[in-house]
């Protein structure tokens, strides 16, 4: 007799991306506009340090700071890490180093890409300079990357009394806002418990897991009871009918969602479950949905979860039957 093989745990690639639009204050506006003009600006803090990239508030006193200064486009690598597999949209398409570079005149380091033939060609203390992008728009990508600057000695000592020159931060046609494309792509694994839950949904069944200590049935299952701190391995099929415990009326149409407003989104406690899950209510005018309404799932062909829930026609549930599930 051999033990049954454990079920295969699901894995799937996921991508989360959205454009992030933000306005720029006077300091960030001057910094990014300066990059467009091949000028690197920092800001002086109350203790005399020069911060690059500049910040709008003093990291020690929290006061607003506006004393801009111009630093050099050359600097020194303070630390680095080799990236041998560049991902899409990173600064360089070939292997490069992520480096912290302290520009001459600055007291803090700027993180950016360093173009080098290999990790053996990179070292802490090496001198580098900005390689400007051919087309600059007022963004951090106006610095295409850093590159080795062989004509300068490593980590030179600053001249006595020397400091970055003040800058008024004034440029023509200043950049006042940016749109940053945020993207996160990763492989998600729901784990053992939710894999069983998702597989059951593909069979139009809803499966939860019961805590062996408090006997609460979690739907969707979490793999452990957060109250008792023990694993939940006892699978329990719940539903298919349930009770609306609370709800809201949605009046704003979501982008890319083909559902006419208004509609109702509800918490639904499936029969046998110790938690309510979310679902849309259909098959009834939105202003007739109520707490205690008995509902059942409606599946579409090939759907991996209920399209919505509709009234079963049963009498409403008594409040005491679901008050602990609201």
Image (cartoon, helix red, strand yellow):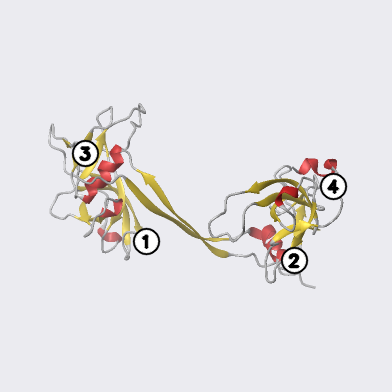
**Which mark's residue is nearer the viewer, 4 or 2?**
4
Q: Position of residue 146 (x, y in %)?
A: 24, 54
What is the distance, in whole Å, between disc 4 and disc 2 at their CAs?
24 Å
Tag 3 or tag 2, which sits nearer the N-term? 3
Mark 1 crowd level (few <14, some 14–19, many ≥20, 10 Å Cα): few
Relative side of 251 to 205, left or right: left
- Give the label on residue 204, or none: 2
Task: Tell which of 123 and 96 is nearer to you.
Answer: 96
Query: Against 205, is 78 above or below?
Result: above
What is the distance, in whole Å, between disc 2 and disc 3 at their CAs?
62 Å
Tag 3 or tag 1, which sits nearer the N-term? 1
Q: Is mark 3 on a helix, strand or loop?
A: loop
Q: Can residue 101 be seen in this snapshot?
A: yes
Q: Do the residues labelled 1 and 3 touch (CB within 8 Å)?
A: no
Residue displayed at 40% across by 49% down:
21
Tag 3 or tag 4, which sits nearer the N-term? 3
Find disc 4 in the rendering and name its residue. Answer: 317
Find disc 1 in the rendering and name its residue. Answer: 89
Q: Can residue 276 be seen in this snapshot?
A: no
Which quadrant holds residue 226? top right
Residue displayed at 38% across by 52% down:
180
Which residue occupies the extreme bottom position in the image? Answer: 1
Find disc 3 in the rendering and name its residue. Answer: 169
Q: Position of residue 268 (x, y in %)?
A: 74, 51
**Which mark's residue is nearer the viewer, 4 or 3?**
4
């Amino acid at each position: 007799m051999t033990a049954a093989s454990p079920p295969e745990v699901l894995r799937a690639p996921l991508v989360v991306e959205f454009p992030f639009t933000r306005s720029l204050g006077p300091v960030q506006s001057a910094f990014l506009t300066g990059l467009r003009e091949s000028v690197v600006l920092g800001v002086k803090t109350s203790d005399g340090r020069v911060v690059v990239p500049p910040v709008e508030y003093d990291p020690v006193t929290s006061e607003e700071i506006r004393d801009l200064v111009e630093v050099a486009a050359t600097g020194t690598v303070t630390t680095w890490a080799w990236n041998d597999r560049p991902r899409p949209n990173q600064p360089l398409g070939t292997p490069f180093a992520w480096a912290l570079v302290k520009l001459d005149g600055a007291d803090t380091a700027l993180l950016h890409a360093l173009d080098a033939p290999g990790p053996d060609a990179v070292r802490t203390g090496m001198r580098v300079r900005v390689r400007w992008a051919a087309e600059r728009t007022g963004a951090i990508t106006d610095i295409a990357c850093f590159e080795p600057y062989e004509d300068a000695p490593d980590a030179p000592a600053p001249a006595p009394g020397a400091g970055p020159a003040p800058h008024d931060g004034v440029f023509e046609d200043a950049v006042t806002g940016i749109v940053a494309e945020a993207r996160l792509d990763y492989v998600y694994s729901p784990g053992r418990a939710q894999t069983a839950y998702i597989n059951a949904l593909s069979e139009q069944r809803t499966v939860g897991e019961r805590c062996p200590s408090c006997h609460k049935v979690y739907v969707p299952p979490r793999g452990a009871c957060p109250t008792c701190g023990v694993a939940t391995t006892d699978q329990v099929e719940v539903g298919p009918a349930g009770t609306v415990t609370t709800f809201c009326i949605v009046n704003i149409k979501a982008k890319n969602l083909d559902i006419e407003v208004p509609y109702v989104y509800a918490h639904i406690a499936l029969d046998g479950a110790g938690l309510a899950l979310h679902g849309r209510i259909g098959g009834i005018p939105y202003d007739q949905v109520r707490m205690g309404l008995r509902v059942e799932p409606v599946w579409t062909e090939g759907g991996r979860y209920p399209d919505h829930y509709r009234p079963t026609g049963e009498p409403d549930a008594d409040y005491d039957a679901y008050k602990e599930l609201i």
